[in-house]
Image (cartoon, coloured by chain):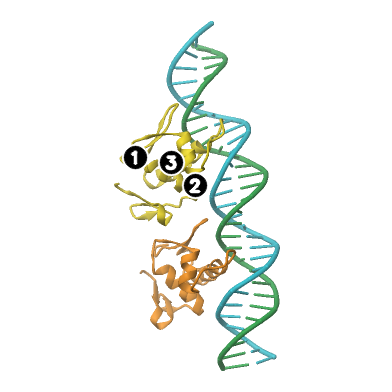
Chain colours: A orange, B yellow, C cyan, D green
Amino acid sequence: MGRLEIKPEEHAALVDGRPLSLTVRELQLLCSLAGHPQRIMTREELFAEVWGGAPRDDDRSVDVYVSRLRAKLGEALPGRRLIHTHNGIGYRFSPDG
Amino acid sequence: MGRLEIKPEEHAALVDGRPLSLTVRELQLLCSLAGHPQRIMTREELFAEVWGGAPRDDDRSVDVYVSRLRAKLGEALPGRRLIHTHNGIGYRFSPDG
DNA sequence: CCGGCTGTGAAAATCCTGTGAACGCAGGGA
DNA sequence: TCCCTGCGTTCACAGGATTTTCACAGCCGG
């Protein structure tokens, strides 16, 4: 998986061996995304996996946490973009930037 | 289908396994075209499948989106032309360049 | 209290869409 | 040859839709 390791069972995500300080939600979301590499996941799917159930019509939780995740990942891996936006659909995780 | 895969149910089109970043409209149009390989489809047919209803007399939406699609496909598959123009009629999708 | 995590609302930034117009290109006729 | 016409291709833009980010209030544990 290159420089990023995710160990859900240890509640940890490592970049080059250094742990990222992710919150529980952030780690859950990262696991959901990284659990289906290269697959476009809709907000509904992500919400169901992380929060459970269906999101409100105008719920932006997924977007907000993607943003927070990107901020922390971008800090640890400058210049790489692991989470891609698919407008009108959802997000996609790509191991290689 | 060679190097191009289209998965409408996943909102994705892949070239050599790599997802193209198509907009919703672009993907819809690609699906319509690729859904009838080797068949010449009129603007009216394409418009009906993607937009629904009938196009205005001087509507150029189909042409513009074919152009955008060709640009993105050409970037991912240099030297190959999958969408052919049939003058005065419409467009035809051919899996083999 | 205090500090971090969460979710929400809203502003800011970005992207998508459809349209009009410019451009190129080929064919026909004078 | 030159001009005109019809058609397809592409550019540019404005409006709208969507996403990104910020700020904040509630909550919970220390």
User: Residue flagged by tag 2: what amino acid is it?
Assistant: Arg
Between discs 3 and 1, the one toward the N terminus: 1
Can you identify the residue that label 2 sits on?
Answer: B25
Of badges 3 and 2, the one in the foreground is 2
Would you call the spot at circle 2 few (<14 residues within 10 Å), some (14-19), or many (20 or more)? few
Which circle marks residue A75 in the picture?
none
Can you identify the residue that label 3 sits on?
Answer: B70
Can you identify the residue that label 1 sits on?
Answer: B37
Closer to the camera in the image, B44 or A6: B44
Between discs 3 and 2, the one toward the N terminus: 2
Residue A22 seen from this side: no
Which chain letter matches label 3? B
SS of the residue under disc 3? helix
Q: Quadrant of residue B12?
A: bottom left
Between discs 1 and 2, the one toward the N terminus: 2
Closer to the camera in the image, A41 or A19: A41
* Location of residue B14 in the rendering, given as x and y in whole percent from the top left corner: 37, 52
Q: From the image, which quarter does the C terminus of chain B lie in?
A: top left
